Amino acid sequence: MTQVQRNYVKVLVVWTVTLLSLYAFQQYFSR
Amino acid sequence: MSRIDWFVVIAYLTWVLWDGVRQARKSKELEGYLVAGRSLPWWLVGLSVMATQLSAITMIGTTGQGYADGMRFLQYYYALPVAMIILSVTLVPFFHGAKVFTAYQYLETRFDSKTRSLTALLFLLSRAMACSVVISAPAVVMSVILGLDVTTTCLLIGIPTTIFTMFGGVRAVAYTDVKQMVIVVFSLGAAVVMLVSGLPDGVGFFDALHVAGATGRMQMFDFRFDITQQYTFWSGTIAALFLFLSYFGTDQSQVQRYLAAKSVDEARSSLLMSAYWKIPLQTLVLLVGVLMFAFYLFTPPPMLFNPVHESQVRVSGKAAEYAALEAQFGQAVSERGSAARQLLDARGGAGGNAAVADAQATFRRSDEDVKAIRERAVAIVRDVSGDASYRDVNYVFPTFVTTKLPIGLVGIIVSAILVAAMSASSAELTALSTASVIDFYQRFGPSKPSDAHLLMASRLATGFWGLFASIVAVWAVELGSLIEVVNRFGSLFYGSILGVFLLAIGVKRANSTGAFVGVLVGMATILYVATFTNVAFLWHNLIGAAVVVAVGIVVSAVTGGPHKGGSGSAERALAGR
């Protein structure tokens, strides 16, 4: 895997973690 | 504003103007002026790309949306990181390698001159309108803060922007963007700190979010699949993906940034910066709005946040009705504050979930009461002022800044709003100027113009578009919620523009007739959908792109397939320029 491809994977991982965190944030503060 | 605040604003704006004009010494030839000599580092391009998205409209309109609707607008940005990856893989290396000045140059090589001209014209129309709205947003702020009329304010923002962009070109725009990012992020952070410190004793940051959450303002995921709803998870991940692909992949104001990067990898890195930081930054902006809601639960808010309109109503025939409404509003706000405190007590008490649910229901009802009274007040303003599209939410943040923040910080935040407007509109001006000169003047103007001639033409075009945008901005103020206005303008055109690029790159058998007819039918379809249906505007991008591709394929097949060879030959031809 090239450096560029590794960067794309890193973005996707951070993106997924961000969305999951926001979902958890929503659920916690909306209950 | 105090004299100290005025000093801060004038000093900061003078520095921005001086530094922008100073960049003219590095923009003495066409390539230096339009794409900064293709020499900018990734961090500068990346900040510049992000700054354009974090305009004054974001600071005013989006914080207002956060106050009124909460965090749901965040869903709009969920597809952005994916779009950035797709573009980094596809269009970024393609455009960068082709050494073009505009994205639309490719369309002539692939199809024909009329397809290039039509697409560039659509860009000019959409961005000229958008640029006007970008200027009108801070005009709304300044008209409240300074008591100036909107026309004067639009010109106060538009003219200095036009001057430094005319001289400094893309390099000046990029360095102004960096200054903007620093001061805007500082301002938002300071606003959060001041809002939290302004909460009453015993009410902390997390309490504020819990109270806001009880009204649905912490909702960031709406999984309903309803194309009439503006912001849902699906519109944010599917429909908005097409908007971002079009905006960052085919809109000259964005393409021009990564054309200015010193290499393909630097261009890719600049886009990935947005992929990482856009959602967290937008969260911060909306959080300011949500915290303002919490702040005004415990500090009585004005019934209307625009003091100018309020004064008009007080001397009108509706004054008595307004005064009666104000009395009801004071009572409702007081009851809502008590309900908020009861909710927090219930959360910390031993009553369990049932007690919390009861307190939440009471609080929600009281918030609905306040909202209903405000809506009646807004209706009175619309009636008295004749401004049917008046929305009070755009005044919430500016009013909070000028009435609740300390001297000095007010000046910094006002400067941030003004510079945000200036840098965002300057980016649009360079793009409009580049498309005008490269896609039209160079082709239809004098034959074999010199580099110096085109440079002068570019500067004059920047001046023209600056004046145009400033004047149209006056009209744009009359439209509704500002952030949505910009996006609506864009969505009328973006889908069709993306469609023609998809056709060019992805469909080898597409020909110029198919592309041209496809764009026209795509535009007609979007205008129909926007006018006669209630499909949310984000979906216009997907519909427009799909119609252009489908019609383009059918018409190309009927008219005999590719006329100029497939996309591969076009890429080779362009790259060989």
Image (cartoon, rainbow, N blue to C red):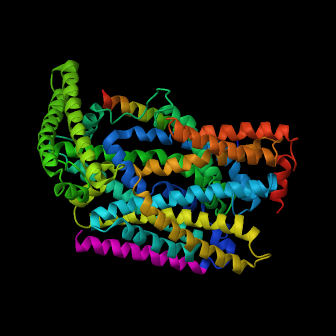
At 75% from the left and 79% from the top, the residue drawn is B450
Residue B82 in view? no
Viewer-closest of B122 and B13? B122
- Quick one: B144 or B17, which is closer to the camera? B144
Residue at the image point whose x is 43% and y is 47% from the top:
B282
Percent coordinates x, y for residue B417 in the rendering: 38, 62
Residue B189, by quadrant, is bottom left
Q: Is residue B178 above or below residue A11?
A: below
Q: Position of residue B150 (x, y in %)?
A: 36, 65
Q: Is residue B52 above or below residue B517?
A: below
Numbered disc total: 0
- Please check the rendered image and state whether residue B531 is part of the magenta-colored stretch, yes or no: no
In the picture, the quarter occupied by the N terminus of chain B is: bottom left
Residue at 50 percent of width and 42 percent of height: B77
Q: Which residue, as the protein is rendered here, is positioned at the far front?
A: B317
In the rendered image, residue B11 lying in the magenta stretch gets the answer yes
Residue A26 location, x and y as percent? 37, 32
Q: Residue at x 66, y 49 (%)?
A: B497
* SS assignment for the magenta stretch, majority: helix
What percent of the width, then of the height, locates residue B141? 33, 60
Image-based side of B479 in relation to B131, left or right: left
Quarter of the image with the C terminus of chain B in it: bottom right
Q: Is residue B232 left or right of residue B393?
A: right
The relative height of residue B138 versus residue B534 in the rendered view (above or below) is: below
Q: Which residues are magenta?
A: B1-25
**Residue B363 visible, this orientation:** yes
| The quadrant where residue B442 appears | bottom right
